[in-house]
C-alpha cells in the first residue's frame, strides 16, 4: 500500500466495530438457502424455454441464492392469471365469465401461462406494462366498469357500507366543479356520495389530505340510467373528485343472469364532470378517449384520457382477452422444476385482486397433485399499487385464506406484498383518523377473528431512483441501512405480532431496471441491504431477478442497465457476470455457510453515526463455530477498522490465529453502462487472502469485505 493511500485511510480515522456475541442477544438463526433467495417473473414473449434452459440456469446457481419467489406480473397489470391454460369459464357455452384453471394432471406440464385483460377495467394506469385504459371515460357507451362482486355482502358477510366502492377522477390540474353526470349500468348505486379532495396528491400522498362531500353531493335514492346532479350552488375548485358507492341495486349486468356475481357491486358506463352554465348546459372537463397507459397508446391519441382510479375490478373476461404482447408468465411446472429452484420448496403467488377463490383452490390442488413443494403462498401482489383499501384487501384475504385452509390446513399464507416503500404505507384516513394501511389491515383481521390466517408479512424493497449517480448515489448508499432498520421497525409498530415473520419477497436498487444494479455501487448496496435486513430481524429476502434478460437503455439517464446479475446482450446471450452476482457470492459463500446449515445473526455496531455510517457491519456465527463479519466500505478511500467481539460477561475478544479475508470491490470490477456492448473491466471474482489475527484491518475503497476466523481474548473491555 502506498503512503498516499494509507494516509487517506488514516485520515478517515479508525472505525471501531463491536460484535455482541451474547447468545441471548442473537437476532435470529437462519438457513442461508431459506433466507437469501431470488425472484422470477414474467418474461419476454416466447423466451421462457430459453431463460429456463438447464444450461442457462446453471450459470446463475454459483451466485448461491436459494429459495425461489415467483412474482405475479399479471396482478400488477390488472389481469387475471390463467396459471394453467387449460380450464373453464363459468359461462362455458360463450367462453366467457369467471375463469378456473384445470387442477388435473393427466396431461404433460405446460411451459407458459398467460394474463387476460379485464373488459370491465376502470383504471387508466397500472403498475405493469401500463398499456390499458379506463372504460369509464373511453367515450364508448357499450363498455362499463364494474366492481369486484367478491366485495359484496354475499361473499364478505359484512354490510356493503363497510366496503364502499369508489372511483377517483384526477383532472391533473384544479378546475371549478359544480356538477356531475353519471351513466349508470347495472348494477347501479342506489346510494352514493360525490366528494372533492383538499391536500396534495390524493393517490400518491393519501395520508396527507381529506375528502369532503359536496354540499349537495349525498345521493340517497339514486335511479338507473344517466343522471345529472348539481353538486353545489357555487363551484368548488378541485383536482381530485371521488364517487363513493355504498348501496347497490343488485340488478344484473349484460352477462349470464344465473350467475349471482353478475348482479353484485356497481357499474358505470361513462362519467362527466364539470359545470352547468347559465343555460343549463353541461361543460365537461374530462377527456374521453380509449387512450390509456404509457407510452404507446398515448402517442397514437390526439387527446389523453383523464386518469381514473377505481377501488376494484370485476374479474369477468373472455377467451379473446388473452394478452399477446411481450409478457409471458412461466408455468408453475417450469418454475418448480427449473434449476433456479434447486429442487426446493418455492414461494408461490395466488391471484387475488383480479381472480376468484375457485381459481386459487385449483392452483393449490394442482401444486399438490404435481408434488411441487410449497414453501409459502402470497395472496395477491402489490395490492397497494392497485389502490386497494386495507379493509377490501382484508375481506378478500379472509375469503381466500379460509377457502385454501379448508382444503390444505398446512399452507403458510401471507401478504400484503407492498410495493417498495421507504416509509409507512398510507391510505385515506378512516373515521378514527387512522392512515396506516398495515395497521388497519391487521385490525381488520382481528375483527374477523382471522389473524391466525396470516403466517407471514411480505413486502418489496425498491428504495431509490434508477438514474441516481454522483452525490445522489452516494447518499443512497449511506441511507440504505437506516431505511431497512426503519422499515422493519415500522411494520412492528403498526401492530405486526412478533411471532409473524417478515419477508422481502422482491427487491433491487430501483423499480426500473437501471445501470446501478450492474455497477460496483449496486454490489455495495446489495450487501448492505441484505446484511441490514437480516440484522433487523427480517427472516428472508429475495433478490430480483434471476432470469438473465437483455440490458435496456434508460431514456431518462441515457445508460444501459437491467435488474439481474449478468451483462446480457440484445440476443439474450450472457456476456459477463455483473457486480451483484459477486455481491451474492460474498453473502452466500463467504459470509454465511453455503447451503442448509443454520447460522446465527448477531448485532454489530460501530462508533459512526447510524444514519451516516460509511462502514456497514454485520455479524454471523457459522455452523462450524467460526465468526464471520461482513463489512461494506462505501468510502472512496480505504478505511481502517478495529474489530472486537464483546461477551455477556463484559470482556472482549479479537480474531486470533489465522483470519480469512475475502474482498470484492472497485479493484476487482468496473462497469458504467455507457454502451450496450460494454463489458466489465476489470472483471475479477472475490479475492481471498489469509492474515494473522488481530485487532485492526484495512478495508479497500468501495469494497465488500468478509473477515472469518476464531476469536481469542485480548484483555480489552
Image: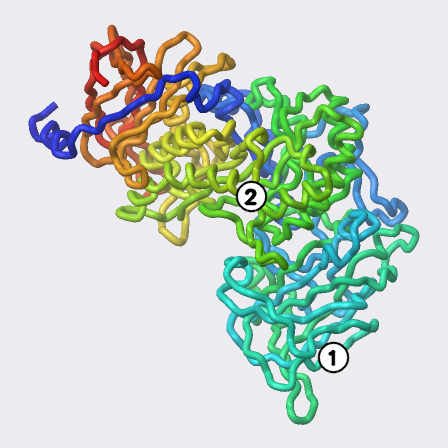
Single out the residue that lies furthest toward the left: 3
Which percent across, then down, holds residue 34? 53, 22
Residue in front for this viewpoint, 637 or 485: 485
Q: Is residue 201 above or below residue 676?
A: below
Q: Is residue 235 above or below residue 192?
A: below
**Residue 317 appears in the figure:** no
Quadrant in which the C terminus is drawn: top left
**Residue 14 appears in the figure:** yes
Q: How far apart are labels 2 and 1 at the CA level?
A: 38 Å
Is tag 2's residue or tag 1's residue first in the polypeptide sequence?
A: 1
Residue in front for this viewpoint, 597 or 284: 597
Which percent across, then down, holds residue 331? 67, 31
Callout 1: few (<14), some (14-19), or many (20+) C-alpha neighbours within 10 Å? some
Question: Which of the numbered marks, if any, corresponds to residue 506?
Answer: none
Q: Is residue 161 left or right of residue 623?
A: right
Residue at image location 74% in from the left, 22% down from the top: 370
Q: Is residue 8 left or right of residue 678?
A: left
Callout 2: few (<14), some (14-19), or many (20+) C-alpha neighbours within 10 Å? many
Which percent across, then down, holds residue 437? 58, 49
Single out the residue that lies furthest toward the right: 258
Describe the element under mark 1 as helix, strand or loop. Answer: strand
Residue at image location 75% in from the left, 62% down from the top: 246
Quadrant in which the N terminus is drawn: top left
Q: Picture quarter containing residue 711?
A: top left
The number of callouts visible is 2
Residue at image location 54% in from the left, 32% down from the top: 503
Describe the element under mark 2 as helix, strand or loop. Answer: strand
In this figure, which residue is indicated by the disc labeled 1? Answer: 228
Residue at image location 74% in from the left, 23% down from the top: 368
In this figure, which residue is indicated by the disc labeled 2? Answer: 418
Which percent across, then down, holds residue 299? 53, 63
Q: Picture quarter containing residue 214?
A: bottom right
Amino acid at each position: 500500500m502506498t503512503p498516499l493511500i494509507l494516509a487517506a485511510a488514516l485520515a478517515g480515522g479508525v472505525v471501531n466495530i463491536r460484535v455482541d456475541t451474547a447468545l441471548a442477544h442473537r437476532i435470529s438463526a437462519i438457513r442461508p438457502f431459506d433466507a437469501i433467495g431470488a425472484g422470477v417473473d414474467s418474461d419476454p414473449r416466447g423466451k421462457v424455454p430459453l431463460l429456463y434452459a438447464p444450461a442457462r440456469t446453471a450459470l446463475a446457481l454459483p451466485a448461491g441464492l436459494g429459495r425461489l419467489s415467483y412474482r405475479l406480473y399479471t396482478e400488477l397489470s390488472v389481469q387475471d392469471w390463467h396459471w394453467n391454460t387449460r380450464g373453464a369459464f363459468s359461462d362455458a357455452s360463450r367462453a366467457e365469465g369467471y375463469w378456473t384453471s384445470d387442477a388435473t394432471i393427466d396431461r404433460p406440464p405446460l411451459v407458459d401461462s398467460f394474463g387476460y385483460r379485464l373488459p370491465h377495467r376502470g383504471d387508466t394506469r397500472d403498475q405493469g406494462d401500463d398499456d390499458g385504459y379506463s372504460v369509464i371515460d373511453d367515450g364508448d357507451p357499450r363498455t362499463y366498469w364494474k366492481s369486484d362482486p367478491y366485495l359484496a355482502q354475499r361473499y364478505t358477510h359484512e354490510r356493503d357500507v363497510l366496503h364502499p366502492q369508489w372511483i377517483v377522477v384526477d383532472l391533473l390540474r384544479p378546475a371549478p366543479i359544480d356538477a356531475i353526470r353519471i351513466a349508470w349500468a347495472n348494477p347501479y348505486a342506489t346510494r352514493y356520495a360525490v366528494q372533492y379532495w383538499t391536500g396534495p396528491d390524493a393517490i400518491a400522498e393519501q395520508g396527507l389530505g381529506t375528502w369532503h362531500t359536496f354540499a349537495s353531493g349525498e345521493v340517497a335514492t339514486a335511479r338507473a340510467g344517466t343522471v345529472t346532479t348539481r353538486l353545489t350552488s357555487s363551484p368548488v375548485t378541485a383536482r381530485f373528485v371521488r364517487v363513493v358507492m355504498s348501496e347497490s341495486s343488485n340488478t344484473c349486468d349484460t352477462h349470464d343472469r344465473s350467475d349471482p356475481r353478475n348482479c353484485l357491486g356497481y357499474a358505470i358506463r361513462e362519467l362527466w364532470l364539470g359545470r352547468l352554465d347559465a343555460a343549463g348546459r353541461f361543460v365537461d372537463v374530462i377527456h374521453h378517449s380509449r387512450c390509456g397507459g404509457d407510452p404507446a397508446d398515448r402517442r397514437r391519441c390526439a387527446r389523453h384520457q383523464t386518469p381514473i382510479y377505481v377501488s376494484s375490478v370485476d374479474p369477468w373476461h373472455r377467451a379473446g382477452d388473452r394478452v399477446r404482447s411481450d409478457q409471458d408468465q412461466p408455468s408453475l411446472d417450469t418454475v418448480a422444476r427449473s434449476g433456479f429452484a434447486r429442487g426446493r420448496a418455492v414461494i408461490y403467488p395466488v391471484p387475488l385482486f383480479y381472480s376468484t377463490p375457485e381459481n386459487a383452490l385449483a392452483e393449490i390442488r394442482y401444486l399438490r397433485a404435481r408434488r411441487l413443494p410449497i414453501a409459502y403462498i402470497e395472496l395477491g401482489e402489490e395490492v397497494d399499487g392497485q389502490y386497494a383499501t386495507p379493509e377490501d384487501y382484508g375481506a378478500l384475504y379472509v375469503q381466500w385464506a379460509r377457502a385454501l385452509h379448508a382444503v390444505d390446513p398446512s399452507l403458510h399464507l401471507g401478504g400484503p406484498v407492498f410495493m417498495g416503500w421507504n416509509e409507512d404505507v398510507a391510505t385515506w384516513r378512516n373515521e378514527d383518523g387512522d392512515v396506516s394501511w398495515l395497521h388497519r389491515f391487521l385490525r381488520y383481521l382481528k375483527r374477523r377473528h382471522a389473524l391466525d390466517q396470516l403466517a407471514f408479512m411480505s413486502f418489496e424493497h425498491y428504495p431509490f431512483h434508477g438514474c441516481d449517480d454522483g452525490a445522489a448515489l452516494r447518499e443512497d448508499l449511506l441511507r440504505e441501512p437506516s431505511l431497512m432498520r426503519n422499515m422493519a421497525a415500522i411494520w412492528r409498530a403498526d401492530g405486526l405480532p412478533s411471532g409473524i415473520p417478515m419477508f422481502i419477497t422482491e427487491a433491487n436498487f430501483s423499480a426500473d431496471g437501471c445501470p446501478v444494479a450492474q455497477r460496483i455501487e449496486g454490489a455495495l448496496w446489495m450487501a448492505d441491504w441484505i446484511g441490514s435486513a437480516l440484522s433487523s430481524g427480517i427472516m428472508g429476502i429475495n433478490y430480483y431477478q434471476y432470469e438473465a434478460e437483455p440490458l435496456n437503455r434508460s431514456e431518462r439517464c441515457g445508460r444501459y442497465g437491467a435488474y439481474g446479475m449478468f451483462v446480457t446482450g440484445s440476443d439474450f446471450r450472457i456476456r459477463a457476470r455483473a457486480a451483484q452476482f459477486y455481491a451474492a457470492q460474498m453473502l452466500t459463500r463467504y459470509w454465511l455457510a453455503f447451503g442448509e446449515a443454520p447460522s446465527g445473526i448477531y448485532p454489530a455496531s460501530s462508533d459512526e453515526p447510524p444514519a451516516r455510517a460509511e462502514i456497514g457491519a454485520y455479524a454471523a456465527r457459522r455452523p462450524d463455530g467460526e465468526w464471520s463479519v461482513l463489512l461494506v466500505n462505501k468510502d472512496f478511500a480505504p478505511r481502517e477498522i478495529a474489530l472486537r467481539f464483546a461477551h455477556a460477561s463484559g470482556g472482549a475478544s479479537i480474531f486470533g490465529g489465522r483470519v480469512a479475508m475475502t474482498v470484492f470491490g472497485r479493484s476487482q470490477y468496473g462497469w458504467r453502462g455507457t454502451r450496450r456492448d460494454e463489458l466489465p473491466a476489470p472483471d475479477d471474482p472475490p479475492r481471498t487472502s489469509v492474515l494473522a489475527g488481530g485487532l485492526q484491518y484495512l478495508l479497500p475503497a468501495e469494497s465488500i469485505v468478509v473477515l472469518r476466523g476464531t476469536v481469542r481474548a485480548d484483555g480489552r473491555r
